Image: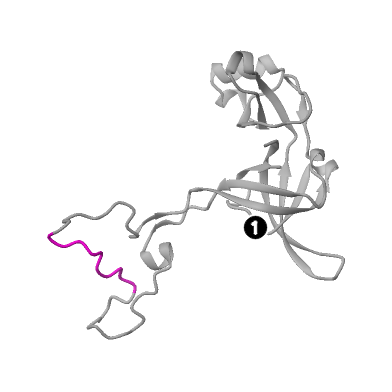
Amino acid sequence: MSGLIGKKIGMTSIFDENGKNIPCTVIEAGPCIVTQVRTEEVDGYSALQLGFDDATEKSATKADLGHAKKAGTSVKRKVVEFKGFDSEYKLGDAITVEQFIEGEFVDVAGTSKGKGFQGVVKRHGFGGVGQATHGQHNRLRAPGSIGAASYPARVFKGMKMAGRMGGDTVKVQNLRVYKVVPEKNLLVVKGCVPGHKNSYVIIEK
């Protein structure tokens, strides 16, 4: 699927033609530079590698510097491959937000906010004991029994328990594009997308 790399700016709301208030996310989408062209003959598949957001040369490795020099651009902080572009692009071409059309639907993937070590009520939506009986005294948010006794004498993989929450790659599908602002490289989509402000997101058509 063709797409772009972007940066989440934040949320706002706009009114549609019926006067309904629509919550929206503003994304700085592109411009992205083609840093490598994958071909069937050389790589076994066709794709475009896009780079977004300039990095300093001081923070780049020699491999990164050589890779960017070949494309005639600066070193990029975020590099992602996309398949399925309709148009033919060559090394060093810039792809802008203008490839998106108002009214179409896109998928947006990003890294969700990290929430640290959380219990089962917040992490998995357990109800807790809710001040019921069964002799509960001070364990209203405890997970309770996890089922393992002398057999099978172990905890099954995937058991819903406390642990690290967030920091996962999350994709939100079928978000409607409400506005495209080419002069500022902005994309306004309906609803929320994963990640904190200024985090990188991948927008796919």
Question: How many labels sit on residues?
Answer: 1
- The percent position of residue 168, horizontal first and vertical second, equals 49, 48
- For label 1, the SS is loop
- The percent position of residue 90, horizontal first and vertical second, equals 75, 20
Q: Which residue lies furthest to the right in this view?
A: 17
Q: Give the range drawn in magenta.
A: 141-150
The residue tagged 1 is 192
Structural crowding at the residue carrying mark 1, measured as other residues with C-alpha within 10 Å and reported as few (<14), some (14–19) or many (≥20): some
Residue in view at x 64 percent, y 28 percent: 76
Q: Which residue lies furthest to the left in this view?
A: 150
Residue in view at x 27 percent, y 70 percent: 144
Residue in view at x 77 percent, y 46 percent: 186
Looking at the rendered structure, the kind of residue marked 1 is: Cys
- Asked whether 149 falls inside the magenta stretch, the response is yes
Principal secondary structure, stretch drawn in magenta = loop
Residue in view at x 35 percent, y 60 percent: 160
| Quadrant in the rendering for residue 66 | top right
| Quadrant in the rendering for residue 161 | bottom left
- The percent position of residue 164, horizontal first and vertical second, equals 39, 53
